[in-house]
Image (tube, rainbow, N blue to C red):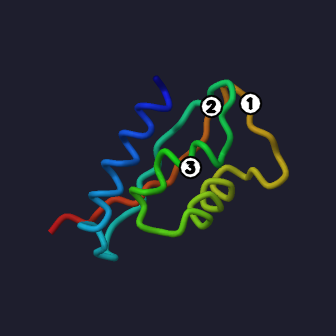
Amino acid sequence: MKHFLAAVLVTLCAGMCWMWMDPEGDVTDITYTVQTGDTVWAIAEVYADCQCKPFGEFVFDIQQRNNLAGKYIRPGDKLVIPLWTRAKK
């Protein structure tokens, strides 16, 4: 069920991404609680299409924001996910 919901979110965001190509906007941080089996890559896949940026860059942003270089994530860890939000006109 978790993967189905993630797929729905990614699909919706992918469609909306083209409307949001305006470079003006802000980064809003959300907190994600790591679940069993999660990886930074898999977590980034859920949100990446909404970011209108290369996937590898988004994964790197998450790693940098959480000081994860060379570290493992564990269930219960709290990760800050930097999400781009469109500027209001």
Please give the residue where the numbered disc 2 appears in the rendered image. Answer: 34
Q: Secondary structure at mark 3?
A: helix
Tag 2: residue type? Val
As rendered, which of 48 and 4 lies closer to the eye? 4
- Taking 58 as reference, is 70 above or below it? above
As rendered, which of 64 and 7 lies closer to the eye? 7
Residue 83 image-quadrant placement: bottom left
Report the side of 71 relative to 11 (left or right).
right
Please give the residue where the numbered disc 3 appears in the rendered image. Answer: 44
Which mark, residue 7?
A: none
Q: Distance between the Cα atoms at labels 3 and 1?
A: 16 Å
Q: Choose the circle earlier in sequence order: 1 or 2.
A: 2
As rendered, which of 84 and 55 lies closer to the eye? 55
Which mark, residue 74?
A: 1
Tag 1: residue type? Arg
- Taking 50 as reference, is 12 above or below it? above
Q: Identify the residue at horizontal 73%, vertical 52% (top origin).
A: 67
